[in-house]
Image: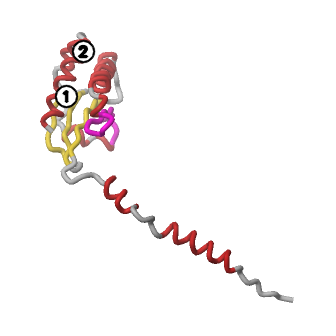
Amino acid sequence: MNRLIRPRPLFVLGGIVAVLAILVPAAGADETAKSAAPEANATKVVAYYFHGNVRCKTCRAIEAYSEEAITQGFPNELASGQLEWRVVNIDETDNKHFLEDFELVTKSVVLVEYRDDKVVRFENLKLVWQLVRDKDGFLRYVRNATHEFVAES
């Protein structure tokens, strides 16, 4: 004996409401999406430390001092996204383009201004190699250069 099972109307209605809740955004959701979208001409600065697979004590010091200079010197800019700190291994295949992009010849600290995800300008902080034995001078140099660079963006 085959009986036809009929779905209960409340069960069907609940299923329809659940599907609609997933497919139709709530009122105001579009406004939230718009406010989260980047603004036109969105500008940010990225402070990079570029290194290779082989890393000596001096290279590690340059990275550590640079990170300290940026993270301790610019907490508000980092929190707002106006400034980012990134460490990049240029020996990895996907990162080789940075060699040409920023004219790198060795491990480097580079400040880069992006507007709408396109490079506007960059500055290689070449004195980090000369100042690595003077931590206070190194921190002052990186912070001053970064401050001026961010102020111009």
Q: Residue furthest right?
A: 1
Q: Is residue 34 left or right of residue 109?
A: right
Residue 133 image label? none
Q: Which residues are magenta?
A: 78-93
Please name the residue shown 40% across and 61% down the image: 29
Relative image position of residue 49 (x, y in whole percent): 28, 30
Q: Is residue 39 above or below residue 137?
A: below
Between the C-alphas of marks 1 and 2, the distance is: 17 Å
Question: Is residue 89 inside the magenta stretch?
Answer: yes
Residue 132 image label? 2
Q: Amino acid at mark 1?
A: Thr
Relative image position of residue 72 (x, y in whole percent): 31, 23
Please name the residue shown 30% across and 38% down the image: 80
Instruction: Specify the quadrant of the image occupied by residue 76.
Output: top left
Quadrant where the N terminus sits is bottom right
Relative image position of residue 62 (x, y in whole percent): 28, 20
Residue 146 image label? 1
